[in-house]
Image: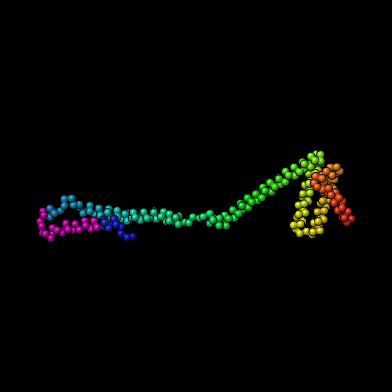
Amino acid sequence: MQPHWITIALVAALAGAAGATLAHELLPARAGASADAHAALVEPDAEPAEDFGARLRDIEQRIATLELRPAPSLRQVAVAEPVAVGVAAESARPERTAAEALSEPELREQVEEALAVIREEERVAREQEKEQKRIEQFELQLEKVSTALGLGTDQVNDLRTLYEAQRLAKLDLQRMWDEGFDRELVAQTKDDNAARFRTELERILTPAQLDEFDVLNGNRKARRDVDELQRRRPKGK
């Protein structure tokens, strides 16, 4: 351990005191003065040898205690240095931008999943809105037909079911075309759907209502076309 500044000061003071005592003891012998002169040179408040030794031991004990304590400057550095380092590290940390945050794989995956859910919900909402508009338009059309033909409640319900079956048949026919089915098969399916629709229509409506229906839909030749189709169809099919 290096000497403490307090230790150096106290040692210097002790050395001065010891020198003064030594000079006090040697001065009468060198001058050859008498006992009275020697007594006159002694300071009135000089301490006995026993008291001086006790003070010396007390000072040495205090010095040993002080040497165990760190200097004030060292204590200040020990406390302040970690704070300074922490502040420097915090100020040196770069701030992440939104683009940098989104570049993290986990966060980007979460954002993509959330966007996928939102897109799906929007798609479903659009489909529901589209379907709702289709139903409203269909009901308006059915109401016009019912009013024009004077249909009863059962006839309206049966006609509604027939139109829905025709709509689904058209969707299935479009699927066959999109998936590359044989053209002749697609054409045959289309003819079968038309014939089935006409047969059900004849069952639901009276002959007079059916004629009026053809007029409303511009299908005056519909019955003749179906009959011609049935005649051209090979037997057994």
Pick whichever, 181 or 34, lies toward us: 181
Q: Position of residue 28 (x, y in %)?
A: 13, 58
Quarter of the image for residue 15 reads: bottom left
Q: Residue at x 70, y 47 (%)?
A: 130
Quarter of the image for residue 19 reads: bottom left
Left or right of residue 151: residue 105:
left
Left or right of residue 6: residue 132:
right
Q: Position of residue 183 (x, y in %)?
A: 79, 59
Pick whichever, 5 or 66, lies toward us: 5
Pick whichever, 105 or 149, lies toward us: 149
In magenta, the rendered stretch is 12-37
Q: Residue at x 61, y 51 (%)?
A: 114
Q: Position of residue 10 (x, y in %)?
A: 26, 56
Q: Is residue 27 magenta?
A: yes
Q: Quadrant of the C terminus?
A: bottom right
Q: Position of residue 106 (x, y in %)?
A: 57, 56
Q: Residue at x 30, y 57 (%)?
A: 4
